[in-house]
Amino acid sequence: MSEVKVDYKADFSAGFSVALVALPLSIGIALASGAPASAGLISAIIGGLIGSWLGGAYVTINGPAAGLIVIVLEACTQFGYQGMLGAAVVAAGLQIIMGTIKLGRKGSAFPASVIHGMMAAIGIIIIAKQAHILIGHTPVSKNPIMLLLELPMSFNNFQPLVLAVGLMTLALLILWNKVQNPVFKKIPGPLLGVILGSIAAGMIGLEGKTLLNVPDDLRQWIIFPDFSVMNTFAGWKSAITLALVGSLETILSAAAVDKIDPLKRKTNLDKDLVSKGVCNLASSMIGGLPMIAEIVRSSANVSFGAKTWRSNFFHGLVILLAVLVLPKALNLIPLSALAAILVMIGWRLGNPKHLLHAWGIGRDNVVGFAVTMIITLAEDLLVGIFCGVIAQYIVEIILGLKIKNAFKPEFKETEQRDEVFFEVEGSLIFSNFLQLKEEVMKLAQAKKNVKMDLTHCEYIDHSVMEQLEELKSFCESAGIKFVVDLSHHHSLGHDALSSLKKDT
């Protein structure tokens, strides 16, 4: 990993600030996942202390993530927490294998519509579960749709003091998002919500099961995995789902953070995937949650001025010190305050604006988005992803994709002096563009200009349009020209990167 000038002060300052964000989020995500609160803290500590040294990324932050809540919760419900840990260890091994055989960089070969539908479903499920905890009522239902339908019953049986703390925290988080003052913006909303929620809980006398319960003795945090679940189909399904979704989220987060890195560095996605696998192995072996490169904390890390991987290390170190120095303070946190934080996260993921955005970037994206979201809510995440991908392929076949081009683009490459000319036919979609993209990146590194003629391309999907934009930025940073001819196509949406169809 190439280095910039070491700036310990900047990295420590960023790591400290991110730790204040990560501490309440890690606890909340653990509880929402059906895990002990300590599991989220173990994950964040290992992700920082170990993951930072293993390389691959520059300014991403590792830790437990909302995107894995649904999978972990389902596994905990089926097998118990130790059984989930057994599946998580196997998932970690699968991640190491995927990174070793260079599947990390192929993560872009996945439809954006399915990813957005998956995240929207996860957001709805988080809200469906956490809204009951915010109210102070234990629901009967397990299915997310039934949980939402059960909310009126929960409101008839709410605990007034619990609801008061939860609503106060939720209102604070909503208002804090509107704060523009740069000094106040440096104070993490989740941390402020937890602190004020704890003060309010103490003043009105909340106690017992309404508060967090974390053992003071850290030896009680250690929980070992039960591998007997791997003798079942359900165990392997959980492991594969964890590995697939965790890897996809890590790859997408790393790629997103690369775009906001002031130094424009590129994550080694294969190395980063191996890094996450090793961290997940260590975390799951001692009772911690699976982790990913988390986008919200990573974005905050960049905004706080992080320069290198050391900020991730310092973030893990600060959380460890907080656990060692202030273990009793954790048990003052009301569960309804943590639920309010998670409801906000769920709303961010499941906001109806995402469906409107899917329509805006091209009506071809709505089918993959909707199928993934609906089947995930009705069935489970892995089935939802599979059906979403199949639905997206069917839509793209209708729009002009030939089966033979599904995984391999059809193009001719000619070179004239310092320019390479690509003439592409057929269709360019999420699963066939990687080969062409890598060819262009090699030429950019060799300082050769590239021109791409897509006149005979029947259909270009949104995922490819995003990657064409990334290629343009990459070539510009390399000091070469990258020209794409899209003059013979019309947009299927209203966004600048909407899918395109060839003019008839």
Image (cartoon, rainbow, N blue to C red):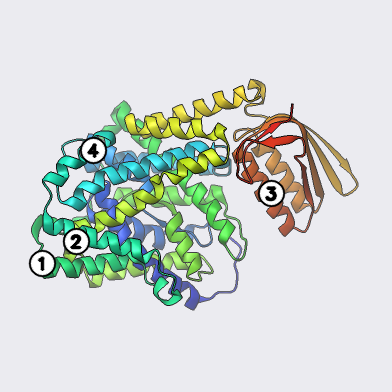
Q: Mark 2 points at which residue?
A: 165
Name which residue lies at 57% across and 52% down: 268
Name which residue lies at 44% across and 30% down: 371
Kindly indicate whether the residue at mark 4 contacts the one at mark 1 (C-beta within 8 angstroms).
Answer: no
Q: In the drawing, does residue 29 fall left or right of residue 3?
A: left
Question: Which quarter of the rendered picture does the N terminus lie within?
Answer: bottom right
> Could you tell me residue 325's position as x and y percent?
24, 73
SS class, disc 4: helix
Residue type at the position of mark 2: Val
* Position of 332 relative to 381 (above/below): below
Q: How far apart are marks 1 and 4 (CA)?
A: 29 Å
> Could you tell me residue 116's position as x and y percent?
47, 41
Which label's residue is closer to the chain start, 2 or 3? 2
Q: How far apart are marks 3 and 4 (CA)?
A: 44 Å
Tag on residue 204? 1
Q: In the drawing, does residue 456 fall left or right of residue 341?
A: right
Residue type at the position of mark 1: Ile
Q: In the drawing, does residue 502 fall left or right of residue 277?
A: right
Which label's residue is closer to the chain start, 4 or 2? 4
Which label's residue is closer to the chain start, 3 or 4? 4
Kindly indicate whether the residue at mark 3 contacts the one at mark 2 (C-beta within 8 angstroms).
Answer: no
Question: Which quarter of the rendered picture does the C terminus lie within?
Answer: top right
Q: Name the residue under label 3.
A: 471
Between 196 and 7, the one nearer to me in the picture = 196
Q: Name the residue under label 4.
A: 147
Kindly indicate whether the residue at mark 1 contacts the one at mark 3 (C-beta within 8 angstroms).
Answer: no
SS class, disc 2: helix
> Could you tell me residue 274's position as x and y percent?
48, 48
